């Protein structure tokens, strides 16, 4: 038999239990549906690795001081069966976004995306430096090995363009994407090239395109310079293209070619060695590939910079010497 006094105690305990449960439920429910960051706040970046669990996800939010207690969020994830569905990556928590909305995006893998631009004419070395500084990209120098194939290096093996990558992804994937784009366009250019070009392989066409890319930024001149290269190669003349020498000099290049620079014994010295250099000298865009595959026919064998970004083209060495003297006087 339960005495009246005990009945009251039990009743108080039951009421207290339900009140505590209701308060716990209300607090955690409010935490789930309330914005993690105020609408007028700044976005916050979080990163989840491949082994991230529900507990680690909640801990990440607490470490960023976005929540005080994660019990409600943790319970919601576990009772919803989402613990094993959280996807790794870098996420941007948006102002006004609730925990429920964030969890939905993490399950969907809606990671932060970034753009990476490969500028036509840049070298593998420069791109490697840029990749190392790219935000939220896991880059290693060995990532280039996957596209190098049997070539001495990966120079020229990326198509100049802007690429989008997912935060937390690796540099290897980005490089393979840019390389595949290059190969697709290079193979089309090779298949549709003009007949009787002095190039034996698509790789040689790519090498020629890289020289064109470095020689001029003027669209109207690309095919003219391509034609000069074809004329000189057909006549077994050295190409005598300054950008190849500059590439061969590497860090020894001080911004201006000297007479001694033109005497260096390097396979990239196109004053000293006939034919194409052993590899491309830069990354190229589609326009340079098109120019290499479709040169403009002419009798030009020479050209010289005018000093305004354009060039003067000549058919004979005598004309070339006159042009050099003319534009040297303008520089003085």
Image (cartoon, grey):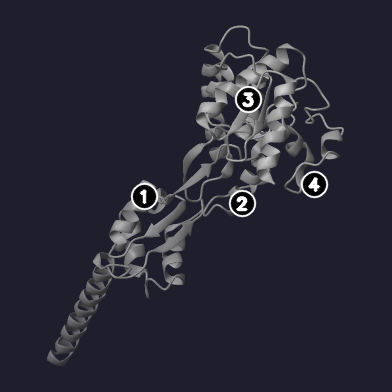
Q: Nearer the viewer, mark 4 or mark 2?
A: 4
Which residue has dot 3 on it?
A: 313
Dividing the picture into quadrants, the one containing residue 288 is: top right
Q: CA distance from mark 4 to mark 1?
A: 51 Å
Which residue has dot 4 on it?
A: 252
Q: Nearer the viewer, mark 4 or mark 3?
A: 3
**Of callouts 1 and 2, the N-terminal one:** 1
| Tags 2 and 3 touching, CB below 8 Å | no
Q: CA distance from mark 1 to mark 2?
A: 28 Å
- Could you say which is closer to the camera, residue 217 or residue 122? 217
Which residue has dot 1 on it?
A: 107
Q: Which mark is residue 298?
A: none
- Could you say which is closer to the camera, residue 67 or residue 124? 124
Q: CA distance from mark 4 to mark 3?
A: 29 Å
Left or right: 253 with respect to 219? Answer: right
Q: Residues within 10 Å of mark 3 (few under 14, many from 20)?
A: many
Residue 146: x and y in percent read 64, 33
- Please indicate, yes or no, whether residue 150 appears anywhere in the rendered image: no
> Dot 1: what SS?
helix
Q: Residues within 10 Å of mark 1 (few under 14, many from 20)?
A: some
Q: What is the residue that sits farthest to the bottom in this orientation?
A: 5
- Please indicate, yes or no, whether residue 64 appears anywhere in the rendered image: yes
Q: CA distance from mark 2 to mark 3?
A: 41 Å
Q: Residues within 10 Å of mark 2 (few under 14, many from 20)?
A: some
Which residue has dot 2 on it?
A: 132
């Amino acid at each position: 038999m339960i005495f009246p006094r005990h009945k009251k105690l039990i009743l108080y305990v039951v009421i207290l239990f339900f009140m505590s449960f209701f308060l716990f439920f209300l607090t955690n429910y409010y935490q789930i549906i309330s914005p993690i960051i105020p609408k007028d706040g700044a976005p916050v970046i979080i990163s989840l690795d491949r082994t991230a669990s529900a507990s680690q996800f909640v801990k990440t939010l607490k470490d960023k001081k976005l929540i005080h207690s994660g019990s409600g969020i943790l319970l919601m994830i576990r009772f919803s069966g989402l613990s094993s569905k959280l996807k790794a990556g870098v996420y941007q928590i948006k102002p006004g976004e609730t925990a429920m909305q964030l969890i939905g995006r993490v399950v969907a893998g809606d990671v932060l995306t970034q753009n990476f631009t490969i500028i036509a004419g840049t070298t593998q070395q420069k791109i490697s430096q840029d990749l190392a500084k790219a935000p939220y990209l896991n880059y290693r120098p060995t990532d280039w090995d996957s596209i190098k194939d049997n070539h001495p290096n990966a120079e020229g093996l990326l198509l100049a363009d802007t690429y989008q990558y997912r935060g937390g992804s690796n540099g290897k994937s980005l490089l393979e994407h840019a390389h595949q784009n290059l190969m697709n366009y290079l193979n089309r250019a090779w298949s549709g090239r003009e007949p009787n070009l002095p190039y034996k392989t698509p790789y040689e066409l790519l090498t020629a395109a890289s020289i064109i890319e470095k020689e001029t930024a003027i669209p109207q001149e690309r095919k003219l310079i391509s034609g000069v290269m074809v004329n000189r190669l057909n006549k077994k003349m050295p190409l005598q293209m300054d950008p190849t020498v500059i590439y061969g000099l590497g860090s020894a290049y001080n911004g201006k070619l000297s007479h001694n620079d033109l005497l260096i014994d390097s396979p990239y010295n196109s004053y000293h060695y006939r034919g194409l250099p052993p590899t491309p000298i830069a990354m190229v865009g589609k326009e340079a590939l098109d120019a290499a595959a479709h040169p403009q026919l002419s009798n030009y064998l020479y050209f010289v910079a005018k000093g305004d970004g354009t060039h003067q083209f000549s058919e004979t060495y005598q004309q070339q010497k006159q042009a050099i003297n003319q534009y040297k006087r303008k520089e003085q």
